[in-house]
Amino acid sequence: MKVLIVGGGIGGLTAALCCHHFGHDVMVFEKASEMSEVGAGIQISPNAMKVFTALGLEKQIAENAFRPEAIEARMGESGRHIFSIPLAQHALNKWGAPYLHIHRADYITALKTALESKQRGAIRTNAEVKGYSQDAEKASLHLADGRQFKGDVIIAADGIKSVIRQTMLGDDKPEFTGNVAWRAVVETAALGRPPNPSACVWMGRGRHAVTYRLRQGRLTNFVGVVERDDWMGEGWIERGDKHGALNDFKGWHPTVKAVLDAADETSLYRWALFDRVPLTRWTDGRVALLGDAAHPMLPFLAQGAAMAVEDAWAIAAKLSVSERSVAQSLIRYQNIRLNRTSKVQAASRANMKTFHHASRIGQISTYGPMWAAGRLTPKIVHNRMNWIYGYDVTVLDGLK
């Protein structure tokens, strides 16, 4: 089967690798002139790593990554510890795969290198897709320069502003969440008091921050989300003002302030967070949506890319059941993924409120029980993530 994949990001490249794994011919269309990612980190949780283990790529993915010691939560201003979930060996024993932090550029490079080694010429850059058409036998991608490519199926992994989704379902109506995110990557050695070697959420009034390490600990990644009431563009690479970032986290713990102090003006970015109503349909005949094109995620659970990785295995496995048509296989893919991704979307949306309690009463009533549970019943705290991290899309009976 010939599979045409729109988008050369994490979801698109993983979809190509999964489809190749199941014996399909793949072609990835990326509108950029080169495959690259701006400087930022990403978390690869065990549920996503299980896919890369099944593909035989665990070592390549982990080569330049960092293995955090724990997931922890602290108060943003005081630094007071709320709870901690151990990782490292714990992730392997409890969830069946490691938990990694990785630079997006390293992630893309590992996936691209793996795909090129398996199928030379599978990636086409400078290939902007404008839409698609299909008939009973084939699906066609229409490029902006007039070229057309035919295949048996089209997988749209072209992100939150998906052209294929727009062609399939029309314009959507993104809603500004009232949150703007800052992000930066700094040299860990430049920090007098670097954050712990963990994935740490710093929670506070109307804002929160996340810190973790990259590239075997040499870099520290920062993401800070602040409530704002002004409408901003839905961009990803808008340069941020360092003074503005420092002001947004004024009075916060010195560890957080140190990261922002060390941030280079040229590597500090911000973007506005928009939410969308969950879709009830991801397919149209021989065409299917994947990752953010199907179920865009707010970043409050660090599962956006992980859900795309799970999607990639699921759609490849579904397409490999010979007794069904392509359209039937894609509907089966949609149906097995829809409930899980909707649940993760909802949980991520709920965390937006959990992280930002503005009143003292709200903080005590939410963070107090978290603190107590972390000390008195730590297993309950750890088990809360089982439904996400313990999931293994590669062995589900429903994928047959």
Image (cartoon, rainbow, N blue to C red):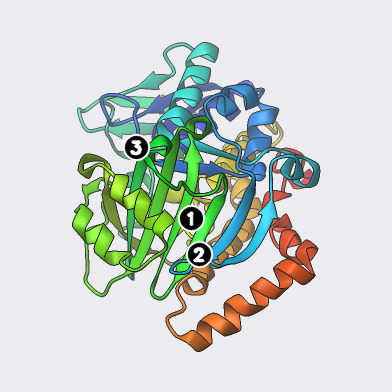
Numbered label attached to residue 295? 1
Q: Badge 3 local density, few (<14 within 10 Å), some, or many (20+)?
A: some
Nearer-N-terminus badge (1/2): 2
Q: Nearer the viewer, mark 1 or mark 3?
A: 3
What is the three-letter code of the residue carrying label 2? Gly
What is the three-letter code of the residue carrying label 1? His
Q: CA distance from mark 2 to mark 3?
A: 26 Å
Q: Residue at x 38, y 65 (%)?
A: 252
Instruction: Label 2: state its secondary structure.
Output: loop
Note whether residue 199 is visible.
yes
- In percent of width and height, residue 114 lies at 53, 19
Q: Mark 3 = which residue?
A: 39
Nearer the observer, 346 or 209 = 209
Q: Is residue 224 above or below residue 263?
A: below
Q: CA distance from mark 1 to mark 2?
A: 34 Å
Displayed quadrant of residue 229: bottom left
Q: Is residue 230 above or below residue 9?
A: below
What is the three-letter code of the residue carrying label 3? Gly
Nearer-N-terminus badge (2/3): 3
Instruction: Label 3: state its secondary structure.
Output: loop
Q: Mark 2 = which residue?
A: 79
Instruction: Label 1: state its secondary structure.
Output: loop
- In percent of width and height, residue 166 lies at 33, 52
- In percent of width and height, residue 213 lies at 49, 41
